[in-house]
Image (spheres, helix red, strand yellow):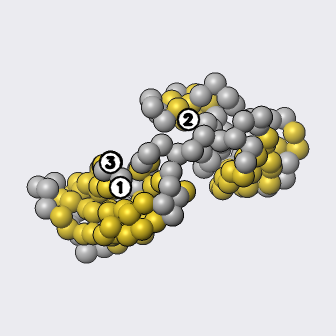
């Protein structure tokens, strides 16, 4: 993951870290970025990073770096749903999810009493890979909400907070 941070998952990492998705902790691998990494892309055995850094892994690399591995990146899990951002949200938030293959997806939002208040995707076929959906919360009351992703018989749910 990339971003504007200096510590993640219990380890010191500047702007760039690998996370173990089963426990949420940073892995042993330290890519050694010296500033923010804003974007990441994988192609085969190469991970591309872009950002405001001047170096990664002790090598000078101004704003763009390619890191190679002998093994291709693993496919995403059967269903990956990230925490909405920002959280708490005032007017809008982005919901990020990943699919291992093309699947019909339903993405819904529920209030604390379990009432469906929004359906962002309704059995919509989505290609494999990463996806972002804009969530409009500007007309919702402040409080706790849950968003649920359903695909291929699997369900993932996350919590978000709306404030004013």
Q: Secondary structure at mark 1?
A: strand
Horizontal and vertical percent position of residue 96: 46, 57
- Circle 3 crowding by C-alpha within 10 Å: few under 14, some 14–19, many from 20: few
Instruction: State the residue in front, 63 or 67.
Output: 67
Callout in the foreground (1, 2) = 1
- Looking at the image, is 86 positioned above or below residue 56? below
Proximity of marks 1 and 3: CB atoms separated by less than 8 Å: yes
Residue for point 69% across, 51% down:
42
| Residue extending furthest toward the top | 28
| Residue extending furthest toward the right | 60
Where is mark 3, residue-wise? 154
Image-based side of 119 in relation to 113, left or right: right
Q: Quarter-wise, where is residue 15 in the image?
A: top right
Residue for point 87% across, 39% down:
59
Report, in whole angstroms, how far the alpha carbon at label 1 lies from the one at label 2.
24 Å
Residue for point 53% across, 32% down:
20
- Say the numbered circle drawn on residue 151: 1
**Image quarter of the C terminus:** bottom left
Horizontal and vertical percent position of residue 51: 72, 55
Q: Quarter-wise, where is residue 135 in the image?
A: bottom left
Image-based side of 161 in relation to 76, left or right: left
Q: Is residue 160 visible?
A: no
Horizontal and vertical percent position of residue 50: 73, 55
| Residue extending furthest toward the left | 113
- Looking at the image, is 57 positioned above or below residue 80? above
Where is mark 2, residue-wise? 19
Report, in whole angstroms, how far the alpha carbon at label 2 lies from the one at label 3.
22 Å
Instruction: State the residue in front, 92 or 81.
Output: 81
> Mark 2 or mark 3: which comes first in sequence?
2
């Amino acid at each position: 993951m990339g971003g504007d941070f200096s510590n993640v998952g219990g380890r010191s990492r500047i702007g760039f870290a690998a996370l173990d998705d089963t426990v949420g902790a940073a892995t042993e691998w330290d890519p050694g970025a010296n500033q923010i990494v804003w974007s990441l892309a994988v192609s085969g055995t190469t991970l591309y990073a872009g950002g405001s850094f001047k170096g990664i892994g002790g090598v000078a690399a101004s704003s763009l770096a390619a890191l190679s591995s002998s093994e291709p990146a693993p496919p995403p899990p059967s269903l990956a749903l990230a925490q909405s951002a920002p959280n708490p949200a005032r007017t809008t938030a982005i919901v990020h999810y990943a699919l291992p293959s093309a699947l019909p997806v339903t993405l819904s939002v529920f209030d604390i009493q379990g009432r469906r208040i929004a359906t962002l995707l309704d059995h919509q076929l989505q290609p494999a890979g990463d996806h972002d959906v804009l969530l409009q919360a500007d007309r919702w009351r402040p409080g706790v909400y849950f968003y649920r992703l359903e695909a291929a018989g699997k369900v993932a749910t996350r919590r978000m907070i709306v404030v004013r």
